[in-house]
Amino acid sequence: MSEDLVKAHLDHKRMWADFDYCYPVISRRSKGVSLGVNLNPDKVCNFNCVYCEVDRATPAKRKDIDLDQLEREMAALLDLTLDGTLFRVAPFDSARPEQRRLNDIAFSGDGEPTTAPEFADAVDRIAKLKWARGLHEVKLVLITDSSRLQAREVIQGLDTLQANNGEIWAKLDAGTETYYKTVNRSAIPFQKILDNLEITARLRPLLIQTLFFSWQGQGPSDAEVDAYLGRLRHILSWGGKLTGIQLYTIARPTPEPEARPLKAAELDAIAEKIRVGLPEVPLEVFHGPEAWPEANQHEV
């Protein structure tokens, strides 16, 4: 196991006890505890990424959003995290002391959070809960595929997020339409994703999340990485603010056995290209596990 990976990093199940919406994870990218809010318990998503870990073969437990229950679940998770009870339970007992810090509450679930009609109300409730407990330093994070950043009903939620120590972690996994259709497999035009990123970055700082991996034996080509860099340069040239890039690869099993992590040296080579091409944007790199099963099967 890679030195910076603990058991809890490899277990990001979006479930906790008998909860329906809220769940805890130890997140490498958050550098601590991230409490997740799943606004897509129906497992419906407008992307169909080949590396997605969501098991859509198993029927959803429920499809509705009960905001009162969601708020109660988050309140309970905050209690369990802050009093240390969470770290007596596997796999959270594997977390090192520095990884037990509550970093954020993240809107990230079994689909795209911004597609939920309840998105803005959920952000508002969680923000009020956070501030009522005096957790001013705890971030609110939206992890998004960038498809609905300019929808009117979503902008209301983004305003609340931004006013409450919020961050937008926006996905960009491709530089070309062809590669986007190959890895993200969405009916949403790639240009719409790019336009959303460009417009939003002018108004609110964005952190870009990029997952590069081996698909059917091949990682992204040099030309694809160059095109990706060109997309980010375009955002910056039009006045967009990018606070950083998180470059990572697959860390946990997926339903697609041909989706595999890049080796550390491969990811590092891409990272160096990004550092040279975008020296003004901070870059973090997160490697995958050192060992990967030859015949990887998704656990259901």
Image (tube, helix red, strand yellow):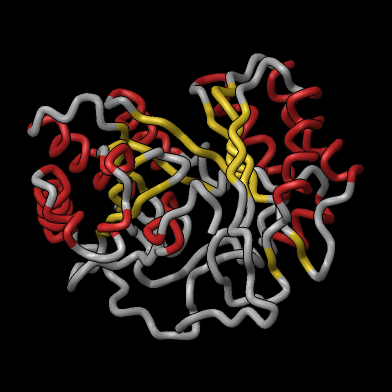
Quadrant for the C terminus, please: bottom left
* Residue 90 in the image, given as x and y percentages of width and height: 26, 66
Position in image of residue 9 (x %, y %): 43, 56
Would you say 199 lies left or right of 212 here?
left
Q: Nearest the camera: 146 or 23?
A: 23
In the image, is 106 to the left or to the right of 258? left
Residue occupying the far right of the picture: 223
Q: Is residue 213 above or below residue 293?
A: above
Whether 7 is drawn above or below 287: the answer is below
Q: Residue sitting at 34 percent across and 58 percent down?
A: 39
User: Percent x, y for residue 148?
Assistant: 52, 45
Q: Quadrant of residue 193?
A: top right
Left or right of 290 on screen, residue 58: left
At a point 40% along the width and 47% down the height, the residue shown is 27
Viewer-side residue, 277 vs 64: 277
Say which residue appears at 26% left-offset and 38% top-offset: 101
Number of numbered callouts drawn: 0
The spot of residue 218 in percent (x, y) is: 84, 62
* Residue at 58% from the left image edge and 37% from the top image edge: 246
Q: State the residue in front, 94 or 64.
A: 94
